[in-house]
Amino acid sequence: MDYKKMYQDKLTTADEAVKVVKDGDWVDYGWCTGTPVLLDAAMAKRLPELHDINFRGGILMWQPEIFKIDNPAEHMTWNSWHMSGIERKAIAQGFSFYAPIRYSELPRYNREISTPSRVMMIQVAPMDEHGFFNFGPNASHLAAVCERAEVIIVEVNKNMPRCLGGFEESVHISKVDMIIEGENPAIAAMGAAAPATEVDKKVAEYIVDEIPDGACLQLGIGGMPNAVGSLIAESDLKDLGVHTEMYVDAFVDIANAGKITGQRKAIDKGRQVYAFGSGTQKLYDYLNENPECMSAPVDYTNDIRQISALDNFISINNAVDIDLYGQVNAESAGTKQISGAGGQLDFVLGAYLSNGGKSFICMSSTFTTKDGTVKSRIRPTLADGSIVTDTRANVHYFVTEYGIVNLKGLSAWQKAEAIISVAHPDFRDELIKDAEKMNIWKKSNKR
C-alpha cells in the first residue's frame, strides 16, 4: 500500500473535518495529553450551531476551546472518565459530568457500549513508515474507541513522543478518515512536583522500609507517591520493576538512578509497563522511542490477574480521607467530585493477590481549610455523599506521618484502634469517643 498517497488523500483542515459532527453525536476527545488542539478550536467555532453534542474525554491538561463558548450547556455535555481541576470547575457551569467506572473496564465498555462515540478526534505522533499513528503516552483505551467510531480524525503533532508498546498503542492509516496537520504545540506538561514536605518524607520513609529488592512498583499521582519515588531513587534497592497505570516523573528518576531493571518480573520481563503518562518534558523525552517502556491498554495494565502475577507488587496511592471502619475515599469531597475511581481499587486488590505484594494508602493526618482551621483526614464516618473508593474489606496498609498500620482482616474494634493510632494526636481522644458511640471500641483498647 502507498501510505504516503493515502496520507495526502486524507489530509484536510480542522474546519473541514469538524463538519462531520451533527446534532446528537457522541464525540471522543481522546485522553490526557492526546486531547486535540486544532480540532478543538474548530469544534468551538462550529458548536454554537449544534445541539446535544456529547463529548467524552478525561484528565484535561488545559481548558478546551469548546468550554469557552457562550452558554456551553445549551450545546454540549462533557463526560469525563477522570476529572482534572479544569473539569471540576466546569461542573458548576452545568455541562461537565463524571462518568463513574473502574478505569480498567474502559476498553471493554467502549467495545460493547450501545452509544459508542461516532466521531473520534485525537492528537497523535507522525505516521511511521508502516502507516501507524502512535497514540503517544495515551494508549489507555483509545484503540477500543477507534474500533467502534464511524469517523476517526487524527491531529498530527511532531512533538508527541512515540511510545513503543506491546499492543493497542497506535491506529493504522487505513482506519483513519481524516488527517490534520498544524502548529505542533508542545505536549502539555503537568509541571514538576512540588517539593516534598516533611509529612511527605515521613510517610515515604515508612513505605520504603517495606519495599524489598526486586519489587514491582505502581505509583499514583501526587506529592506522597513522588516523595516515595525520590527516596527509592536514593535508596540501596535494586532490580525493581514497573507495572503501573500512570507513568510519572518519579519513575524516570528511579530508572536514571539505576534501580529499575525489571529482571525479576514474571511477565513483561525488562519492560516498564504503563497505560498512560503525564509529567514534565523529562518524562516525554524518556518515553520517546524507549524500547524498555511498554505502552499498553488499561485493561492489561490494571488487570488484577496481570498485577497478581508479579511477585512483591508494591502499590502506592493517595486518598482524601478514611473513616474508622476503614473505608477510603480517594475521589470526592462530600458530593463534590474531585477526580475519579481510576485504578486504585484494581491495584489494591491485585497487590494483595501478588506473592509478597503490598498496597499502601497514604495521606497526611490533617488538612487546613481556607479559614485556617486544622481538620483530621481520619473521620468517624465519611462525609455525606463521599464516595467509597476502597471498601473496608480491601484496604491493606494505611500510612500517615504518624505511622503505618496493616488493616487487613482486623475486627472492627482492632481496625478503629489501628487507624486512630496513626491519627494526629490532637484528634485521637475525640475519635475514640466517636468509636465508642459507634460500638467499635473495646474498653481494653489502647488509649
Image (tube, grey):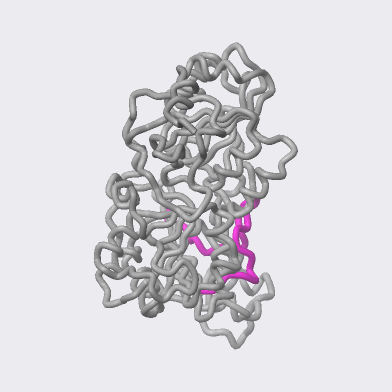
Q: Is residue 35 left or right of residue 439?
A: left
Rendered location of residue 251, percent (x, y)? 34, 60
- Residue 324 appearing in the image: no
The outermost residue toward the top is 49
- The one of 3 and 247 positioned closer to us in this rendering: 3
Query: Which quarter of the figure has residue 335?
Result: top right
- Residue 265 appearing in the image: yes
Residue depicted at 54% across the width and 76% down the height: 354
- The one of 240 and 13 positioned closer to us in this rendering: 13
Rendered location of residue 370, percent (x, y)? 41, 45
Residue depicted at 60% across the width and 63% down the height: 390
Query: Which quarter of the figure has residue 233?
Result: bottom left
- Residue range corresponding to the magenta coloring: 373-397
Characterize the magenta stretch by its predominant secondary structure: loop
Q: Is residue 74 magenta?
A: no
Q: Is residue 440 left or right of residue 143?
A: right
Residue depicted at 49% across the width and 66% down the height: 361
Query: Which quarter of the figure has residue 220?
Result: bottom left
Residue 261 higher or lower than 139, as above or below: below
